[in-house]
Image (cartoon, helix red, strand yellow):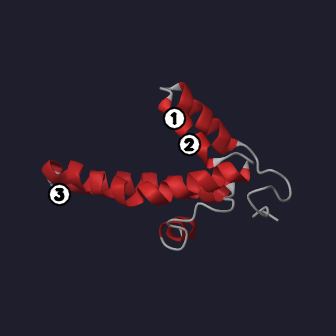
């Protein structure tokens, strides 16, 4: 949970440096769990009519932190943040970005900063 809180507070607009796999995947996991819990709660409360609006608000609120942690994760693999644009390519782009997110960190320092794992 600390990884998620860090991404949405102190690193909200931080596109510099590097993010470990753990930081990226913990952010992604909690983003998914919050979305899922919110959807289930709204369904139980019978608020399906505003559920989509609330989901859109959540997506907009977490767009920049999500983009920032993705860019920092790409930096950790010694790639430019511009690689996020690969998702423009339908299906294949998302697979490529997913593979990049799974890769290990570049050992030692790289042009984006020191290795956060060390």
Residue 82 percent coordinates (x, y): 59, 44
What residue is disc 3 on? Answer: 45
What residue is disc 1 on? Answer: 87
Q: Residue at x 61, y 48 (%)?
A: 81
User: Is label 3 or label 2 in front?
Assistant: 2
On screen, residue 84 versus residue 22, left or right, reads left
What residue is disc 2 on? Answer: 84
Near-viewer residue (82 or 47) = 82
Q: Residue at x 49, y 72 (%)?
A: 9
Residue contact at pointers 1 and 2, CB within 8 angstroms: yes
User: Is label 1 or label 3 in front?
Assistant: 1
Secondary structure at badge 3 equals loop
Near-viewer residue (34 or 87) = 87
Residue 102 percent coordinates (x, y): 67, 43
Q: Dot 2: within a 10 Å radius of its alpha carbon, few (fewer than 14), some, or many (20 or more) residues? A: some
On screen, residue 43 versus residue 112, left or right, reads left
Inter-mark Cα distance, 1 to 3: 35 Å
Secondary structure at badge 1 equals helix
Inter-mark Cα distance, 1 to 2: 6 Å
Inter-mark Cα distance, 3 to 2: 37 Å
Q: Residue at x 85, y 53 (%)?
A: 107
Q: Residue at x 66, y 47 (%)?
A: 80
Near-viewer residue (92 or 16) = 16
């Amino acid at each position: 949970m600390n990884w998620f809180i860090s991404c949405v507070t102190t690193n909200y607009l931080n596109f510099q440096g590097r993010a470990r796999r753990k930081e990226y995947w913990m952010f992604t996991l909690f983003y998914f769990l919050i979305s899922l819990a919110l959807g289930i709660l709204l369904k139980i409360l019978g608020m399906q009519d505003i559920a989509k609006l609330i989901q859109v608000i959540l997506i907009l609120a977490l767009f920049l932190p999500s983009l920032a942690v993705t860019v920092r994760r790409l930096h950790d693999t010694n790639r430019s943040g511009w690689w996020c644009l690969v998702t423009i390519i339908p299906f294949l782009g998302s697979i490529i970005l997913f593979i990049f997110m799974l890769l290990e960190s570049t050992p030692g320092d790289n042009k984006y900063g020191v290795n956060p794992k060390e």
